[in-house]
Image (spheres, rainbow, N blue to C red):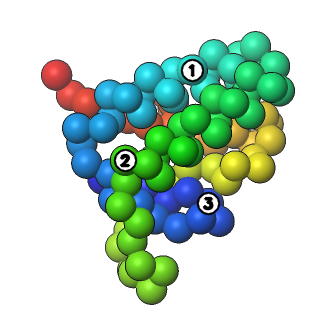
Amino acid sequence: MIMRVMGEGQFQVAEGHLNRLNELDEELLVALESGDEQHFRAALGSLLDAVKEYGTPLPDDSLEPSDLILPDPEASLDEVRELLRAEGDGLIPGIPE
């Protein structure tokens, strides 16, 4: 799966890491619902760090379409809420059973 982190590029992430990314996505949802800025920053940072840790960066000149677009690390609570409204149930999709 190709994930784009706004302002940082694209990362190829193996499906085997999606469960962990979903856990971090759930934590981000909890932080958004609480409105706690510090919790939100930590949760967003953890999710983006995990994408970069588990993913392989694609070259800057790569023209691969992104399966997911994630906010940049400086995105506001409101910007991420807006993304979630557009995406539906979190930023990272679940793995079908």
The residue lying at 45 percent from left, 86 percent from top is 61
Residue 66 seen: no
Spatial separation of the CA atoms under disc 1 and disc 3:
20 Å
Percent position (x, y) of residue 19? 32, 28
> What amino acid is labelled 3 in the image?
Met
> What amino acid is labelled 1 in the image?
Glu
As helix, strand or loop, the secondary structure at mark 1 comes to helix
Other residues around mark 3 within 10 Å, as few (<14) / some (14–19) / many (≥20): some
The quarter holding residue 96 reads top left
Asked whether 88 or 45 is in front, the reply is: 45
Point out the frontmost of discs 1 and 2.
Answer: 2
Spatial separation of the CA atoms under disc 3 and disc 2:
17 Å
Residue 54 seen: yes
The residue lying at 47 percent from left, 52 percent from top is 52
As helix, strand or loop, the secondary structure at mark 3 comes to loop
Q: Which sits earlier in the primary sequence, circle 1 or circle 2? A: 1
Query: What residue does disc 2 label?
Result: 54
Query: What residue does disc 3 label?
Result: 6
The quarter holding residue 44 reads top right
The residue lying at 43 percent from left, 55 percent from top is 3
Tag shown at residue 27: 1
Other residues around mark 1 within 10 Å, as few (<14) / some (14–19) / many (≥20): some
Q: In this view, does 40 lie to the left or right of 95?
A: right
Percent position (x, y) of residue 53? 43, 48
Q: In this view, does 79 lie to the left or right of 51?
A: right
Residue 12 vertical position relative to residue 90 in the rendered view, above or below: below
The residue lying at 69 percent from left, 30 percent from top is 42
Q: Which sits earlier in the primary sequence, circle 1 or circle 3? A: 3
